[in-house]
Image (cartoon, rainbow, N blue to C red):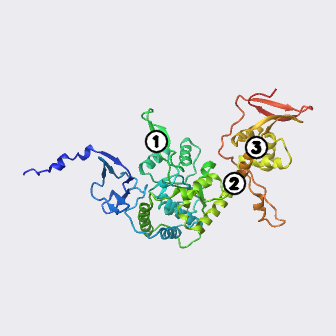
Amino acid sequence: MPKKKRDKQSEERPKKEDKKSIQVSFFEVHNGLVEQIYDPSSCKMMFIHWDDKLGYNPRTGPDPGIEIDNEVYIPVEGDEYQYGAIKLPTGVEEYGDVGKLIEEIKEHIHRYVDVSSFFETIAAYYILISWLYDEVYVLPYLRLRGDVGTGKTRALDVIGGLLYKVISTSGCVTPAPIYRLQRKWNGSLIIDEGDFKDSSEQAEVIKILNTGIEVGKPIIRCNTNDPAKLDIFPVYGPKMLSTRRDFKDKALESRCITEIMKQTTRRDISDQLPKKFHEEQDALRNKLLLFRFRHHGKVDSEEIQKVEMGDIEPRLRQVTRSLLVFMMDKPEIRKSFLNFLKDYNQTIIEERADSFEGWVVNSIFKLREDGHEHITSQMIANRITEEYAPKREPTAQRVGVYLKTLGIQVKLKRTENGVLRIIVWNNDLMEILKSRYVTSVSSVTADIEEGESVTEPQSHSDVTNVTDVTATDSREKNVIRKEDGTIEEEIIIEDGPER
């Protein structure tokens, strides 16, 4: 049998195996974007190539790689899709306009899960921005909090299933797979049952979540096989969590937009997700992919910086501002969102006020209101015992540790009662602490009827996640005694007493 004659051009072309292969789930090209999809007809991963001028062109066949400058880009492979750990579009579908797409997403959420109407709206906007997360610099997390049987997992399936290239995990997940899955897929992360216990691995997961809200904050680790090499893991991206309780880590708490879940009474929500649900999600993901193609590179992050968000804390403003992108031409929705943030901000302050730091700050202001000019750690500890934690009896040393955490300085001062170590009253700092830890009494008392009793705040069983430092170091202690021999104040002196 004669050999098949090869043309000269094919002989001169470099062999494919000699070219560098790069596995990616998406990459930018001239005038467009390439995204990975799963083709159910061929059961293969492939690329869709979007051209801003020509539209899209599906790359099919046994070799879906795209060659650029002697490099072959091929889709990411793995078992994650087969076992449902990652969800991908299967193509693109027309959605009309953005407003229509938002309404379709909200209807889908309402059909299968029971959350507040406002959270339906916020979730719809979060889903949109997740498909353009690489166009903004900071993103909050969606969090569902509730007891067993309140629909948290269902909400993760319904809402989280529409996020951009969603990666599903559980609360028992360790840092290593999170690092590798996010670097491999560059998608959204879902963590179910995220009530992390106090262990080194779970503390590492919390670090991932605390740094993952902002672009350009990767986790850097030494390579386990070669300590001279560094492994860099990008952790920025959309995330959705479910927990039974608040996070002990208040920094992580401040990064979340939280929906309190309750057991549903709606009869129109099916106990199990039907086949129709999965078909609707597949169609919505395809529409969201087309949305990404059309809006990638067109997000005006500077315009949202001009929106005045009022007296909302800087961190809350920072993590939620990106959600305003698609509200700029919808003033009513934007107004409702900002009002929600104000209420949410007040809730954060109230929860913060009922922490040990909150007790310290509120005690300082109450002592000041009572006319005390010189406030000591012991006075603060006594006030905390009287008003917040009668069974705890915190020590002056512990209060001193928290004063440092809050940035409050102390100094030795000679008074009529002897030399005391008093706090330094810095007006600017105290105003900041007041806005963060002291709730507005006027906003609460306005809703209290005349003669109605007010329940005193109850003590926490656990303090917030701040290192509890005890007085076991080498710092010098000094006890000031009055003329009758009684102890006036125990003072911890770091640099020795003033002479």
Image spot of residue 149 (x, y percent): 57, 62
Query: The disc labelled 1 sits on which kind of residue?
Result: Ile
Residue labelled with disc 1: 232
Mark found first going from the N terminus, 3 or 2: 2
Element class at badge 1: strand
Mark found first going from the N terminus, 3 or 1: 1
What is the number of the mark on residue 241?
none
Q: Residue at x 40, y 53 (%)?
A: 80
Q: Where is residue 283, by image quadrant? A: bottom left
Question: How many marks do you count on the picture?
Answer: 3
Nearest the viewer among 432 and 255 is 432
Mark found first going from the N terminus, 1 or 2: 1
Q: Residues within 10 Å of mark 2 (few under 14, many from 20)?
A: many
Would you say the residues marked 1 and 2 are in contact, meaning their CB atoms lie under 8 Å apart? no
Instruction: Answer above or below: position of 207 versus 246.
Output: above
Q: Residue at x 85, y 45 (%)?
A: 372
User: Nearer the viewer's eye, disc 3 or disc 2?
Assistant: 3
Residue labelled with disc 3: 426
Element class at badge 3: loop
Image spot of residue 496 (x, y percent): 77, 27
Q: Residues within 10 Å of mark 1 (few under 14, many from 20)?
A: some
Q: How far, Cα to Cα, is label 3 from label 2?
A: 21 Å
Nearest the viewer among 332 and 261 is 332
What is the number of the mark on residue 349?
2
Image spot of residue 453 (x, y percent): 82, 62
Hey, which residue is sitting farthest bottom in the picture? 268
Quadrant in which the C terminus appears: top right
Q: How far, Cα to Cα, is label 1 from label 2?
A: 36 Å
